[in-house]
Amino acid sequence: MASKLRQYLQDPFLKRLYSDIRNVGSLRAISVDLTHICNLRCVGCYYFSEGMDRFASPGDDSEFDAFIAREKTRGTNFVTVVGGEPSLVLGRVKKIYDNFWMNIATNGLRKIPHEGFENMPIGISVWGDFETDRRLRGGDKVDVFAKALQNYRDDRRAFWYYTVMPGNANEIESVVEKCVENGNRVLFNFYGDIDGFGGDLDFRIGFTQVRREIDRMIERYPTHILMTSYFSKVVATGSLYGQKWGHDVCTSITPEHEANQERIRNGALYNPHFRAYNADFVTTRRCCTGIDRDCATCYDTWEHFSWVMLNMKKHLGSKQEFTNWLTTMYLFYVINRMINFEDGIKWLPEIHARVGRLTAEEGWRAGVAA
């Protein structure tokens, strides 16, 4: 393994990316719901579909402050902020920002101010074009996408966390175009249809056309798409070197949770430091996005980042496979600003050029099912 790694790192570009990651040091991550309250009810949102809002956050911040102290003592250095809608509790967001590397997911209705949050990565949700987004997230009344575009125009902190759906692949180009024209970048997520609505939302249709559109967007906007063709395929197919995505391979689990004991015993890799905290800041759940949900409905991009990142050894079979792993890892670190964003983002076109599109044959050779 060491000899292969030395061989691949003779490439100056790969050596630069690898060195940047190594200089950050080890990552000890958790996720936390900062509030159980939200100002939207998106169709099929995992948070409310799973009843996670029953874990109410305290009215005062004494328990939250104690939570931060415990996690700092435990060695946590990275926090994924979810919810609920975090922009409704900016005081808590500020405390996370001041103490950890972090990212935040927001619906974009309330702008997170620049002052005090100058270098915070902000992932803004969008689920489709104006009509689709209004229907699925705005209850056919609120123009969520339009409002969020206005709030985050030319904001260097912001990127769009675009949840794509099998039946709405035809909207991808127009949505990405609007995001880029707004001065922002785009990272894709994939809708899991946790409530079984079916139709255009049904993941069982498959994401083949969605992946084609993502590849086209990479070619059209190589400086603005924060996902490679390789990583898009891993998430959309749920396949990685003979493993099929599910609870038995998910790496973002709460290790001490009773629902995960059999999973831990199977020997598949996982992050031993990770915890998924509910909004009471004390209790934990099985994983980032689920309590009891079927993991076949999980196409969450952040969890799949972890799956790839922890499986470095599987990617050492060739220089291209190592490049696929390293660029995935690097983009995670750049998006979340553990690597200086302005320095790191300039490599985006070269990253896309190195990974390129995956043919079916290349996909199998790299351990990803077509």
Image (cartoon, rainbow, N blue to C red):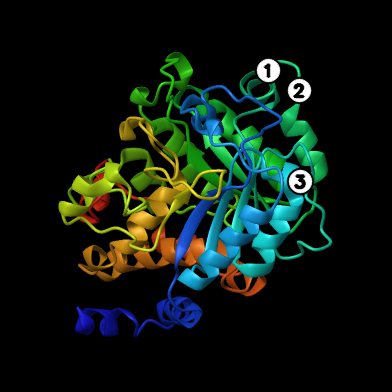
* Residue 349 showing in the rendered view: no
Instruction: Identify whether 214 is placed above or below 311.
Output: above
Residue 139 - label: 1
Asked whether the beta carbons under mark 1 and mark 2 sit within 8 Å of each other, the answer is yes
Q: At numbered mark 2, what does the secondary structure look like: helix, strand or loop?
A: loop
Residue 107, given in percent of the width and then of the height, sits at 68, 38
**Regarding mark 1 in the picture, which secondary structure is present there?**
loop
On the image, the x and y values in percent for residue 199 come to 44, 14
Label 3 secondary element: loop
Residue at 64 percent across and 69 percent down: it is: 99
Residue 151 placement, left or right of 104:
right
Q: Which residue is mark 3?
A: 182
Observer-side mark, 3 or 2, equals 2
Quadrant that contains the C terminus: top left
Q: Nearer the viewer, residue 344 or 114?
A: 114
**Could you tell me the amino acid type at mark 2?**
Val
Q: Is residue 68 left or right of residue 283?
A: right
* Residue 1 figure quarter: bottom left
Q: Residues within 10 Å of mark 3 (few under 14, many from 20)?
A: some
- Mark 1 Cα-neighbour bin, 10 Å: few <14, some 14–19, many ≥20: some
User: What is the three-letter code of the residue carrying label 1?
Assistant: Gly
Q: Is residue 54 above or below residue 280?
A: above
Q: Is label 3 in contact with label 2 (beta carbons under 8 Å)?
A: no
- At x 60% / y 51%, what residue is drawn? 221
Q: Of residues 270 and 99, which is closer to you in this image? A: 99
Q: Which residue is mark 2?
A: 142
Going from the N terminus, do you reach mark 3 or mark 1 first?
A: 1
Asked if labels 1 and 3 touch by Cβ distance under 8 angstroms, the answer is no
Q: Amino acid at mark 3?
A: Asn
